[in-house]
Image (cartoon, rainbow, N blue to C red):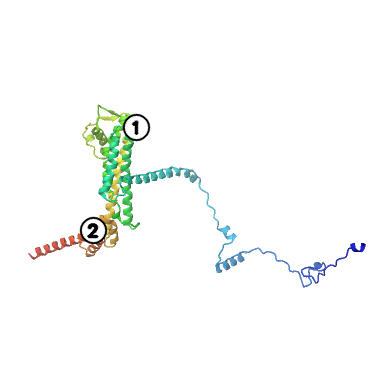
Amino acid sequence: MLRLFRRTPVAEPDSATVPGIVPPSAVGDGRTPSGPIEKTPKPETPTAAKTEKSAAVKAEAGNDIPSQEELDRSIVTAPPKKSWVRWILPFRYLYLYPKIAVEALDDWLIGLATLFGSEIIDDRKRLIRMMSVFGIAFLVGVLPLGYLSLAAILFGFAGVLAMGRAWVVNEKRRTAIVKKLADGDPDLMPDLRWSALISAFQLLNLFPLLYQHLQRDFGLYRVDGDTNFFDWLWFSLHMTYLKALPDFTTLYGLDMATISFESSWGRHVVLISRLMFDFLLIQAVVRLLAIRSTIREAVAAVKADPEMSVRLGRRAIEPLTEKLRDPDRAVRGAAANALMQLGEANQIHRITIEVEKAAAKAEAEETV
């Protein structure tokens, strides 16, 4: 029984015959049974020459990926801001926020103009829509409805400004089409020149109603006796329109006013009225001069670029018709071509007959 539990010695494997095992005797001299031990080479530090060589090889192989060193070199730190710039930067919001507010107000006015018919192409339908909306505002403004009447009058003022701004945007769009900065047919756009003018004339009704309501509700003015609409109309003309034009009452010393100021707020309202009138007047003059300049330049270039005259639309018919009498044959041909594209062959036929008659008359006079 004891022999069953006796420990049997296990023979050690021969390192010479088992692959992968180095005998202890070979460790000292650094040799294996098959030869010397292969030592792992240490990683070499990349030099500038090797870096340039590897970059060139990558570029040739089409894998021009910058190394980390190249990325570190390419990082350029921003120069520190000057002290005076740091002081000025907070004040930029004084310009930024009012600009955003003005742009938002302008967009709101342009959207409001659609209620007055600014997008209707037909002139008659647009005029009916516009005068109907203004008529409702006037009707509510005349009635003694308190603040509701005052709100209707202010809505009428907003409508006047809205039609003016819509006209400006419309003309800028037409100018961009003529200068080939945008595409479109100007004849498919509403012509808001007369609409803007007629809406501006509504101020003759709005200003007297506004002053009358401010006197009735807040007592901003001093009135001598009873007043009617025509008294407030004269007050509006005297304080608003005649200040932008030669005032004959001041020149000749005539005092026809029966209304004066009771409160400083009344003066503030008159000042705002003057600014509004001057703004509309200057806007109209500048825009009309710009329209005239655009038409003149486009028609003058009809010989070199007839397409500019065509892009004017129907506004170019009258000046192009005059170009048919130009002594330069090339100009007459270009104008006739532009009129044909605008569908005005009747104009060409009419002018041709007139020219032929004038030539025949001159020839007959020479014969006599």
* Extreme residue toward the bottom, this view: 34
Residue 360 picture quarter: bottom left
Mark 2–mark 1 distance (CA, rounded to whole Å): 54 Å
* Res. 93 in view: yes
- Provide residue 344's location: percent of width, then percent of height: 23, 59
Query: Does dot 1 land on a helix, a strand or a loop?
Result: helix
- Provide residue 150's location: percent of width, then percent of height: 32, 35
Locate the N terminus and report the quarter of the image it occupies.
bottom right
Give the residue pinned by disc 2.
Answer: 320
* Extreme residue toward the left, this view: 368
**Crowd around label 1: few <14 · some 14–19 · many ≥20 (10 Å):** some
- Residue 244 is tagged as none
Left or right, residue 66 beside residue 359: right
Q: Which three-letter amino acid code belongs to the residue tagged 1?
A: Trp
**Crowd around label 2: few <14 · some 14–19 · many ≥20 (10 Å):** many
- Residue 265 is tagged as 1
Left or right, residue 35 beside residue 143: right
Observer-nearest of 160 and 1: 1
Locate the C terminus and report the quarter of the image it occupies.
bottom left
Query: Does dot 2 land on a helix, a strand or a loop?
Result: helix
Looking at the image, which residue is at 17% across and 60% down? 350
Q: Which three-letter amino acid code belongs to the residue tagged 2?
A: Leu
Looking at the image, which residue is at 16% across and 62% down? 353
* Res. 220 in view: no
